Amino acid sequence: MERNLAMENKQNDELEIDLKQICSLILKKAWIILLVGALFGTMTYVYCTFVAEKQYISKTQIYVIDKQSENITSTDLTLFSALSNDYIQIIKTRPVIQDVINELKLNMKPDELMSKIAVNKEGDSRIISISVTDTSPIKAKRIADSIAKASAQQIYEVMDAELVNVIQPGNVPEKASSPTTMKNIFIMFVLGSVIACVIVVIKFFLDDYANY
């Protein structure tokens, strides 16, 4: 019993010594760890600034009033939600996307254009937001405006809507939405530092094992 306790205390002491050694080693090698992190961050900055394609988002909004609106109470949010979901699905249909491709003479397939589009409902309102992402801010605006126009016509015809208005035309974005340079730099700095830290600790254990 006493022998087992002695062995356990010895193992605990060794573990404590190892942890202290590791912490001391990390502090001693901190400049290398931070240097590797800075290198990762610098490489990320260069990539985001000079290599990565910048993406721009243009947003437009449409407002839909159907012929049954006057019979709907303000508490009937379920019906509002269902109708808005219908509008969203219509905006994503091939006829709308194909109309946009034809109007703007875009050299892309419907699925390719669809991947650039995000459609969302604004809360419980009748406002539908359409966002378009592209490498050109002007092209993003043109596509957004064309989608709003084509989808308004399609909703009017398919849903027999009373009125479909474009309440906000697409904007020409001044700043790129991606890549998010500072965020990426921070992530890669942390990642580089962690990798360097792991390598330092592994090298410590390998050297320790070799000496043993």
Image (cartoon, grey):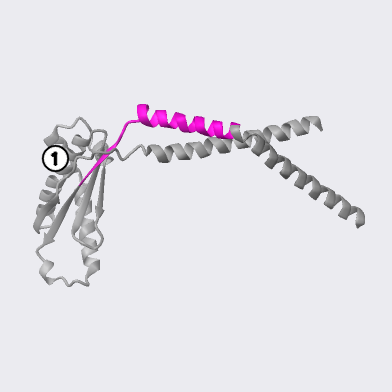
Residue 17 in the image: above or below residue 126: above
Residue 192 placement, left or right of 54 = right
Magenta span of residues: 32-59
Q: Nearer the viewer, residue 158 or 101?
A: 101
Q: Residues within 10 Å of mark 1 (few under 14, many from 20)?
A: some
Q: Secondary structure at mark 1?
A: helix
Q: Would residue 126 be found to the left or right of residue 18 on screen?
A: left
The quarter of the picture where the N terminus appears is bottom right
Q: Is 33 placed above or below 84 here?
A: above
Decide which of 128, 211 is in the foreground and name it: 211
* Residue position for label 1: 99
- The C terminus lies in quadrant: top right
Task: Name which residue lies at 62% across and 37% down.
Answer: 198
Query: x and y percent of residue 70 in the render?
Result: 10, 69
Q: Residue at x 32, y 31 (%)?
A: 53
The percent position of residue 97, horizontal first and vertical second, equals: 19, 41
Residue flagged by tag 1: what amino acid is it?
Asp
Give percent across and percent down for residue 141: 18, 40
